[in-house]
Image: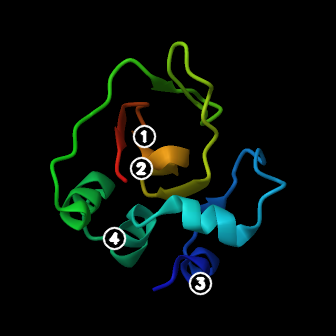
Amino acid sequence: MEIESALTVVTGALLDPTQHYLGRTKGELMEACGLCPHWILARSDKPMLDLITEGYGFPIFELEGGEVGADMIYRYPEDEPLHPILLIQRGEEKYLQYEHGFIAIVNKNGNQFVTRCD
């Protein structure tokens, strides 16, 4: 399923949820998302991190030192803040895709797993 068509049928999927990328086209934003959203949108039978791990095929390590705020912006000390390109919300999980291959999965309790898949 292509991400563009999936976005129109999957409840809770939203490109540019903070409206930070208003000057970029939908195609540019979708291309910047890479493959991870495809793995999440294709199946809903497992937690999002499991789907990404299976799809990626390489070890995925949690990045430490940064944090996703309530505004969905990822902040790491001394780096520019990253605004989400894509938000997918399903059940108790939120998937946030950022530029440079950064992704975050946040659950209803605020627990978050941030990694980079490129």
User: How many neighbours does mark 4 have within 10 angstroms: few (below 14), some (14-19), or many (20 or more)?
Assistant: few
Nearest to N terminus: mark 3 or mark 4: 3
Residue 93 drawn at (x, y percent): 42, 50
Mark nearer the viewer, 3 or 1: 3
Q: CA distance from mark 2 to mark 4?
A: 11 Å
Q: Is residue 64 left or right of residue 28?
A: left
Q: CA distance from mark 3 to mark 1?
A: 24 Å
Nearest to N terminus: mark 2 or mark 4: 4
Residue type at tag 4: Ser
Q: CA distance from mark 2 to mark 1?
A: 6 Å
Q: CA distance from mark 1 to mark 4?
A: 16 Å
| Secondary structure type for disc 3 | helix
Residue position for label 4: 44
Mark nearer the viewer, 2 or 3: 3
Asked if marks 3 and 1 touch (Cβ < 8 Å), the reply is no
Mark nearer the viewer, 3 or 4: 3
Name the foreground residue: 92 vs 101.
101
Q: Is residue 4 left or right of residue 58?
A: right
Residue type at tag 1: Val
The label number, if any, that marks residue 93 in the structure image: 2
Q: Which residue appears at 76% of the width and 50% of the height?
A: 21
Nearest to N terminus: mark 2 or mark 3: 3
Residue 84, relative to residue 26: is it above or below?
above
Asked if marks 2 and 1 touch (Cβ < 8 Å), the reply is yes
Residue position for label 3: 5
